[in-house]
Image: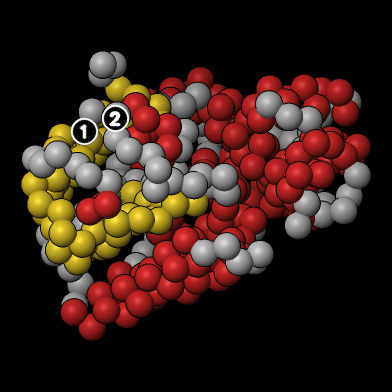
Amino acid sequence: MRKNFESKSLLELYQYLHLPVDLLDVTEGFTIFNLKDVGFTLPYQSASYRPNFFSFLFVKEGSGEYTIDELTFEVKPHSVYFTNPSNYRTFSWTHIEDICLITFDEAFLKNYINKEIYDNFPFLLTETVKPQVVSDAFFQSVEGIYKQIQQEYLGKAEAKYPIIGHLLAILLYRIKEHIWQDYNPIYEGNRSSQIVISFKRLLEKHYRDLNNGNVEVVFKVQDYADAQHLHPNYLSNVIKSKTGKPIVTWIAEKTLVEAKTLLQRSTISIKEITYKLGFSETAHFSNFFKKHTGTSPVQYRKAHLL
């Protein structure tokens, strides 16, 4: 087994860890289920992996540990634990009675909640957060919400994922109000952490400005470096060492997310999307999109237009 694993989805991670995947439907980048239904052989210790998705654990009854880089956190009953796509981590379980896991990717947040997702929920940009043990009253309130989400997830409503998106937004607002009301990610961690967070924020803002027509030129690595008064090589090294992904990969992934959103939720032509995202020709955009998704922009739009 490899020492470290880059996971694009929870399905891919569970396949790597040789865990059952029949509970997972990742067609829209979202999952929810109770860990007691997975069938972990306890005590369980995972291999090291880096996820490409956000996750929330709602631990009503259970115990274990999460380790992110050199930090280890104990997971206790009535705790809420959040992680995002960032550093390598492992998890272990000694007892699982009632633990709800919710995962979602950035595209899901953009498609079904809000394009300005990080403005509304800045805590999503945090690097490392220890589990929060919450009051009985608060846990009961969020439990009611995530059980509604699970009910919709298991159902077959035509508007299934828009409904889940609305419920997830309510859950995020509740968590923000109770746990991260005054959270500002720019002050978290050391200098390298601040550089990464500032880059993520600028990346998000820049593509929002592109979509709104406020800017016409797509940023290159030099532009992101200039914005923080850094040498581009230094910025690239920090991003790679802190996140495990080159800065060009971050930019390509953001471009892909925005392309999917535009193809699904707008009526502008593919030619307009091509230029909006900084490609000089439609053929270049199509090749880029097909390389990362396995389908053409035209086919993707026909299959996913909302």
From the top left corner, tell me how far across and down residue 180 is, in percent.
Answer: 34, 67
Q: Where is residue 134 in the image (x, y as percent from the top left)?
A: 20, 72
Name the spot of residue 302 as percent of width and height, x first. 81, 44
Q: In which quarter of the image is residue 182?
A: bottom left
Secondary structure beneath label 1: loop
Which label is found at residue 46? 1
Which of the two discs, 1 and 2, labels the residue nearer the N terminus?
2
Q: How many labels does the image show?
A: 2
Q: Which residue is drawn at 78% across and 51% down?
A: 305
Q: What is the x, y in percent for residue 79?
A: 20, 64
The reply to whether residue 243 is visible in this rendering is no
Name the front one of labels 1 and 2.
2
The reply to whether discs 1 and 2 touch (Cβ–Cβ < 8 Å) is yes
In the image, 272: left or right of 231?
Answer: right
The residue located at (36%, 64%) in the rendering is 183
| In the image, farthest residue toward the bottom | 137
Instruction: Name the image colouring.
Output: secondary structure
Of the residues shown, which amino acid type is indicated by label 1? Ser
The residue where tag 2 is placed is 17
Q: Is mark 2 on a helix, strand or loop?
A: loop
Residue 175 can be seen, yes or no: yes
Compared to 191, does 264 lie above or below?
below
Q: Mark 2, residues whose alpha carbon is within 10 Å: few (<14), some, or many (≥20)?
A: some
Instruction: Determine which of the numbered discs, if any, sits on residue 219 in the image.
Output: none
Residue 278 image-quadrant placement: top right
Residue 211 placement, left or right of 41: right
Amino acid at the residue labelled 2: Leu
Residue at 57 percent across and 62 percent down: it is: 156
Q: In this view, does 306 lie above or below 223?
A: below
